[in-house]
Structure formats: structure tokens, C-alpha cells
């Protein structure tokens, strides 16, 4: 059992890189609350350990790095068992794990959309299902789901990705209503174009065309998403069931 009784524990899925890593570093570097940081990746253990080393070196925070495919319920359950044994229950859950696919829906194979839905949507259901009972028992908790503007309006050539993020948005609103009596807040952040490795597939021409459409004239940064995640995780107890758009005025 945990020997960190005065700390809060945050689990951030998909935190080997990008928004997840930025969020983990943001939590670790804060002085207002002492955090146990749990980071997770399902596909790149080396990248995950790199994130853990960075967190420990820069902040000295307690950090547990767990490899698990959060789209698989059994692996997810084992991960939560390890967290409970090390730190106790999860106080803040950040569902960030995700992947993308660009191309016509009719060109996709069932295996591809099944993989995408498992990573983007089932992972959120799995982690919430395992985190919520402890939160209900404590009558306290925060859940922040990382969504996308395409979950709000849909995107051509990203039909299944849009469906997965739209599912997150609807699930966020519904679960928030279930958990509000237990003083647990559930919100989502619908990100616009954020400067992460997920967008490295864009050509320079495509990249510039998108920038030209964004009133803020730039992509967002992972640190900006991390700051909003932390704000939702540490306050706003009357704010729940919301999908907050962070896109520089794009959509």
C-alpha cells in the first residue's frame, strides 16, 4: 500500500510523448499539490521510460511508468491493481491515449477501425470503469477526457476518428450526470491542431494551409493543453459535463 498518504495520484494514459508527456511534467512541476504521477503507454516502453526519467530528473516527483494497452480491459485492470498497490486509488484520471487515421472511410479495413475505436474510445470506457468505484467511495474525483474538434463537427477523411471523439464527447456528458451526486467532475477538452508527432505526417503545404485557417495563426502547444488539464483537475467543482474547445478560434 502507498506510503504517500498526503499526496494525490494522477493517471495520464498515452503519456510517452506529446500532450500526455507535457501533462505529466506539468503535474510533476507544480508546488500547490504534491502528486504521484502514473504514466502509461501501450506501444513504446522506451519512450515511456524516457518520460519517467525526465519527470524524476526535473521535479523529483514520485513516478510510476506502466506499459499497458488501455484499449484492452484485462491489461487496464492489471494496471489499476499496480497503481492501488503503489499509491492507492486514482484521484485524477486523464484519458489521453489516442491514435489517428487519415483516408477515405471506404478504403479502411474493419481491423483498422476496430483498432482505432479500441485505442480512442474503449480505452476511455475501460479506465473510467476501473477508476470510478474508488472515486465514488471517496466522494471525490476528476476525469478529463482528451477529445478533438472533429468530435464536435466531423472531418472528411477522418470519419472513424471523428466518431471516436464524438463518442468521447457524448460519454463525457452522460457520465458527468451519473457522477455529479458523488461530487465527481467529468469534462473533455476538444483540441484543435496541437503541435505533436501525430501531425508530423502533414506536408509543409498542408501544414501551412491549416495554419492559414486558424485565427490565432498557429498551432497550439502540448503545454497549453497541459495547463488546461491541470486547471480542470484542481478546481471548478461546479463545472462538469462540458466539452471545452481549445483550438485558437479555428472551428
Image: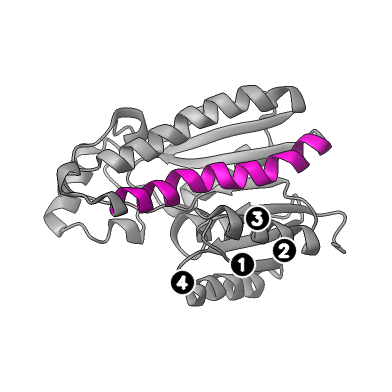
Q: Nearer the viewer, residue 29 or 164?
A: 164
Residue 125 in the magenta stretch? The answer is yes
In the rendered image, residue 10, in percent from the top left (x then y), is placed at 67, 52
- Of circles 3 and 1, the one toward us is 3
Residue 130 in the image: above or below residue 54: above
Question: Of marks 3 and 1, which one's residue comes earlier in the chain?
Answer: 1
In the rendered image, residue 142, in percent from the top left (x then y), is placed at 67, 38
Q: Which mark is residue 44?
A: 4
Contact between labelled residues 3 and 4, with CB atoms less than 8 Å apart: no
- Of circles 4 and 3, the one toward us is 3
Residue 247 in the magenta stretch? The answer is no
In the rendered image, residue 183, in percent from the top left (x then y), is placed at 74, 28
Q: Name the residue tied to disc 2.
A: 82
Measure how far apart labels 1 and 4 are at the Cα level. Answer: 11 Å
Q: Which element carries disc 2, helix, strand or loop?
A: helix
Residue 64 in the image: above or below residue 100: below
In the rendered image, residue 136, in percent from the top left (x then y), is placed at 77, 35
Label 1 neighbour load within 10 Å: few <14, some 14-19, many 20+? many
- Of circles 4 and 2, the one toward us is 2
* Stretch in magenta: 112-138
Q: Which quarter of the rendering shows the N terminus?
A: bottom right
Q: Residue at x 30, y 28 (%)?
A: 153
Contact between labelled residues 1 and 2, with CB atoms less than 8 Å apart: yes
Asked if residue 10 lies left or right of residue 218, the reply is: right
Q: Which element carries disc 3, helix, strand or loop?
A: helix
Label 4 neighbour load within 10 Å: few <14, some 14-19, many 20+? some
Q: Name the residue tied to disc 1.
A: 66
Amino acid at each position: 500500500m502507498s506510503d504517500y498518504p498526503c499526496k494525490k495520484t494522477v493517471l495520464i494514459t498515452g503519456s510517452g510523448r506529446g500532450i500526455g508527456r507535457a501533462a505529466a511534467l506539468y503535474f510533476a512541476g507544480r508546488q500547490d499539490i504534491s502528486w504521484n504521477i502514473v504514466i502509461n503507454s501501450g506501444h513504446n516502453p522506451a519512450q515511456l521510460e524516457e518520460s519517467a526519467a525526465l519527470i524524476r530528473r526535473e521535479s523529483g516527483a514520485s513516478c510510476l511508468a506502466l506499459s499497458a494497452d488501455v484499449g484492452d480491459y484485462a491489461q487496464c485492470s492489471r494496471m489499476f491493481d499496480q497503481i492501488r498497490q503503489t499509491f492507492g486509488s486514482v484521484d485524477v484520471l486523464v484519458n489521453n491515449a489516442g491514435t489517428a487515421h487519415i483516408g477515405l472511410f471506404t478504403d479502411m479495413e474493419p481491423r483498422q477501425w476496430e483498432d482505432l475505436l479500441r485505442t480512442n474510445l474503449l480505452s476511455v470506457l475501460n479506465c473510467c470503469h476501473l477508476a470510478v468505484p474508488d472515486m465514488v467511495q471517496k466522494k471525490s474525483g476528476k476525469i478529463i477526457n482528451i477529445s478533438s474538434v472533429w468530435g464536435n463537427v466531423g472531418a472528411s477523411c477522418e470519419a472513424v476518428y471523428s466518431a471516436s471523439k464524438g463518442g468521447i464527447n457524448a460519454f463525457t456528458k452522460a457520465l458527468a450526470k451519473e457522477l455529479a451526486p458523488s461530487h465527481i467532475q467529468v469534462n473533455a477538452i476538444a483540441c484543435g491542431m496541437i503541435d505533436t508527432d501525430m501531425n508530423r505526417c502533414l506536408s509543409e503545404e498542408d501544414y501551412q494551409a491549416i495554419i492559414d485557417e486558424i485565427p490565432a495563426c498557429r498551432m497550439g502547444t502540448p503545454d497549453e493543453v497541459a495547463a488546461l488539464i491541470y486547471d480542470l483537475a484542481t478546481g471548478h467543482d461546479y463545472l462538469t459535463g462540458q466539452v471545452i474547445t481549445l483550438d485558437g478560434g479555428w472551428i
